[in-house]
Amino acid sequence: MSKWYEKTLEEKSNIIYSRIRLARNWDEYVFPSRLDEEGSRELVDGLKDGLKEIPYPYYALENMQQAEKKALRERRILNRCAVEKTYAQGLYLSEDESESILLGADDHIRMQFLAPGLCLEKLWQKADAADDRINEHFPYAYDEKYGYLTSFPTNMGTGLRASVVLHLPSLSMGKKFHGLTSEMSRFGATVRSVYGDENENYGALYEVSNQKTLGMTEKEILDMVAKVALQLTAQEEQMRKLALDKNR
């Protein structure tokens, strides 16, 4: 089976792919950073026992080679914590790598859904359904005021991180680009380079994501990220047209 990132979309666009990530924690355990080796093993085994119906292959990350974990990080499946942690961790990963459930890394459960193009709403529907199924087996750490409780305060509330990766070669060469991306924070969005830093971003790939997860509904987050992504896309197209007209 081909991977999700090997698929080619028919429409021409500088929107590369969309991602939905949900962070959740089982209310019977403290956050993973507070668990020792025995506690981590107990947590992951308990989660695995309750998630037997998940149709994806399961991988015990503590037994995986470091090079393979780093490759998974490059493909946006794992983060730094999951790669560096030596205690028990689990990963359910679909064959095309578009859907994954990570157990025992930053948070007890991290669900992720990826697809080419702009399709946040479609991915959110998948994530929401998976979230409901998991919640039937495991009560989440939740507060009436602060929403879902997570290891990082920036993920509290909905626990939702929606992001879209864009290719902005023309727009990013402009002198006003950094000011433009900073302006997006007024809408609650963060624009950051995927590879490299602000001074040297390899491939001109930029990720647009929500800055906050607290005080916004899931729909508001999805709509905001999509709106900013489309605005940057439109400006990139305009810059390409201007460059072509001036330097044909």
Image (cartoon, grey):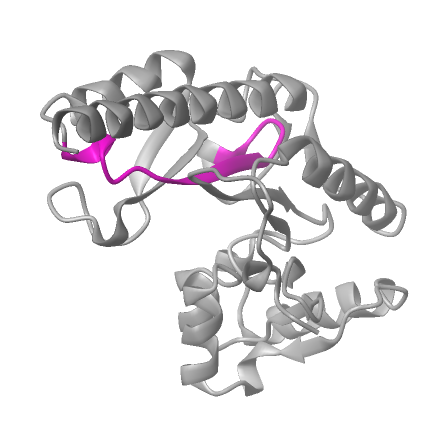
Q: Which residue is drawn at 30% across and 21% down?
A: 238
Image coordinates of residue 192 in percent, x first then y, are 30, 38
Image coordinates of residue 93 in percent, x first then y, are 68, 68
Q: Nearer the viewer, residue 43 or 162?
A: 162
Q: Which residue is drawn at 56% across and 64% down?
A: 6
Query: Residue 23, relative to residue 155: is it above or below?
Result: below
Q: Nearer the viewer, residue 127 or 200?
A: 200
Q: Is residue 204 shown to the viewer in this render?
A: yes
Query: Residue 100, relative to residue 114: is it above or below?
Result: below
Judge left or right: residue 173 versus residue 9: left
Q: How many labels does the image show?
A: 0
Judge left or right: residue 179 versus residue 231: left
Judge left or right: residue 72 versus residue 137: left
Image coordinates of residue 123 in percent, x first then y, are 69, 40
Q: Residue at x 50, y 37 (%)?
A: 163
Image coordinates of residue 155 in percent, x first then y, are 51, 35
Q: In which quarter of the image is residue 167?
A: top left
Query: Residue 16, relative to residue 57: is it above or below?
Result: above
Q: Give the range drawn in magenta.
A: 155-173
Name, please, the residue furthest toward the front.
248
Q: Is residue 63 magenta?
A: no
Q: Does the magenta stretch include residue 172?
A: yes
Quadrant containing the N terminus in the rendered view = bottom right
Q: Which residue is drawn at 20% across and 24% down?
A: 245
Q: Is residue 85 shown to the viewer in this render?
A: no
Name, please, the residue furthest toward the top.
186
Quadrant containing the C terminus in the rendered view = top left
